[in-house]
Amino acid sequence: MYTRSAIFCGRILPGRQEEFYTAVEERLLPAWRQMLHATDVRLYRPVRQDDGTPEVFLVQEIDYPSLKAMDEALNSPRREAAAAAHQSVMHLYEGHHYHYVYQKIGGVK
């Protein structure tokens, strides 16, 4: 399994936190769940962090069965729909996001 993660750094505009997270659940989550070959989507709203670390206000993870499946998803029209959904919330925050791709190792015991 492979996970593509987006780490959103920066800050949500003052007084817009709940609006942002509601929009993420109502607009972004459905678009991300519709990504081709996606097997699971997880979102995290950070509540604590170590001193001196960058401000992170959202972490998104989408699982795919293979790198080939992930590449197909990233080149599909569904990705364009997800990008449009993302554009609809960008006015609510200042910052940027980074993508990382992880391969699962080990398992839960």
Image: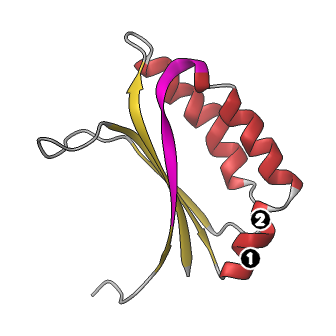
Q: Secondary structure at mark 2?
A: helix
Is residue 17 highlighted in magenta? Answer: no
Left or right: where 10 falls relative to 94: left
Per the image, the residue denoted by label 1 is: 69
Mark 2 Cα-neighbour bin, 10 Å: few <14, some 14–19, many ≥20: some
Q: Nearer the viewer, residue 20 or 40?
A: 20
Q: Are marks 2 and 1 in contact (CB under 8 Å)?
A: yes
Q: Amino acid at mark 1?
A: Ala
Is residue 38 found left or right of 13 in the rendered image? right
Q: Which mark is residue 11?
A: none
Cα–Cα span, label 2 and label 1: 6 Å
Quadrant of the image containing the N terminus:
bottom right
User: Vertical placement of 104 versus 21: above or below?
Assistant: below
Vertical placement of 107 versus 88: above or below?
below
Relative side of 5 to 67, left or right? left
Q: Secondary structure at mark 1?
A: helix
Quarter of the image for residue 30 reads: top right
Say which residue label 2 marks: 73
Give the class, few, some or many, for how many residues have Cα within 10 Å of label 1's Cα (few <14, many ≥20).
some
Under mark 2, the amino acid is Ala
On the image, the x and y values in percent for residue 51 come to 11, 41
Give the percent coordinates (x, y) of residue 58: 43, 41
Residue 98 lies within the magenta run: yes
Q: How is the image coloured?
A: secondary structure
Residue range highlighted in magenta: 91-100
